[in-house]
Amino acid sequence: MDVRFLHTADLHLDTPFKGVTHFPEEKLAELRESTFQAFSTFIQYALETKPDFIVIVGDIYDGAHRSLRAQLKFQEGMEALAEAEIPVFLSYGNHDHLKGTWTRFDLPENVTVFREEVVRKRITVRGETVNIFGFSYPERHVRESMIDAYPVAETDGIHIGLLHGSVEGDESHAVYAPFTKEALLAKRYHYWALGHIHKRQALHENPPIVYPGNLQGRHRNEQGMKGFYEVTIENGKATRQFVPASSIVFDTLSISCAGVEHAGDWLAICEEALSHYQAKHHVAAIVALEMVDIDEQAAALFRQSNREEWLSVLREVMQKKSPFIWVNELTYAHSLKTNDAIQSMMNPVFDTMEQWTTEQWEDVLQDVYQHTRSIPYLERLTNEDFEAIQTEVKRNLMTELIERG
């Protein structure tokens, strides 16, 4: 006898997209609708495949105030599942915690919502008892471990844990409800359905301890196709299959500029790479292009026009292509062969940045991240954030130097 369910998390409905520059007005609505479209894809898949139940592990909404439209769209999805008699078990995370203020929509009876204490919910699937454990965040910051509140599995039935949190000691993301893999394995559950980390990954395979990632990438640091998992538990063993859901993907392409002498050569190379990407993925995309293998000839070419001019021409070439693809950014790789004088001048700067401690980075960024008006709205910077900032600084410095010669 098998039990089949869908596992999703981090929907972040109604995300306000940021950082997409000069985006065409006629496509802006499509971008802003992408979280809803990905959610619609998820609901449609559930209606077509009829899983035994669904688990949603936190951050359904992008903020504690939960916009009316986001709640309406979510309620409509839950009602569609109710008509199809598909149960849903959900918990709220740090973004949509229970202390938020919002105008409430009543969810249909097929939806079971976990409250602030870890509790067990039961469902019977073709005579098999399924035990589902979880909790919702009572407030935005849950710093303490919640693992001790999850009971060890009993001998009978299937046991599934819902946990919106992060691995203890891993500061690549804001650390909430920290846990260790060993602590989860000690509970002897058949499947751990995780949320909070937006990158799809498995911390353990048997039994699976799994982050599905979010349904829709929201910026360039959330690259590639996003989606959810379809999970089957048969004879006590869980297997899973990834199901794509993104309506728009963020990505980065590297463009080799070796031997590029004329603008037409560069445009042809970029167009070929972007068209190949479209043909392969069949999805709308927002991409950053990184120029690599930059020799003296290519560097001299790029100095003849600024980045915005290069971008403008390339966007014009690509605007009639389908599916839609938008070149959001153009950078020059700092680690490759550009002008030797430029490289030797910047190497000490890059070396210094790489040696900075977390405290030194925080000191540099304190005007933004320690400002009294910013603190309530910004998460504490993680190691991943510092690495991303360092990479961006390097790109911008090298780009400026190449353009200015």
Image (spheres, rainbow, N blue to C red):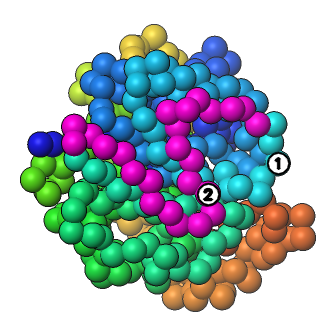
**Label 2 secondary element:** loop
Magenta highlight on residue 251: no
Q: Is residue 9 left or right of residue 130?
A: right
Residue 268 visible at all = no
Depth check, front residue: 174 or 114: 114
What's the residue at 21%, 68% (across, down)?
155
The picture quadrant where one finds residue 43 is top left
> Which residue of the protein is positioned furthest toward the top in this rendering?
320
Identified at 63% across, 63% down, the residue is: 116
Judging depth in this view, the residue of 275 and 57 nearest the camera is 57
Q: Can residue 109 be found in the magenta stretch?
A: yes
Say which residue appears at 48% left-offset and 52% top-offset: 57
Q: Position of residue 54 (x, y in %)?
A: 39, 40
Res 84 → quadrant: top left
N-terminal label among 2 and 1: 1
Amino acid type of the residue tagged 1 in the rendering: Thr
What mark, if any, has residue 101 been given in the picture?
1
Mark drawn on residue 115 = 2
* Residue 311, placed above or below residue 351: above
Screen quadrant of the C terminus: bottom right
Give percent across and percent down for residue 139: 71, 64
In the rendered view, tell whether residue 108 sits above or below residue 352: above
Report the span colored magenta: 104-127
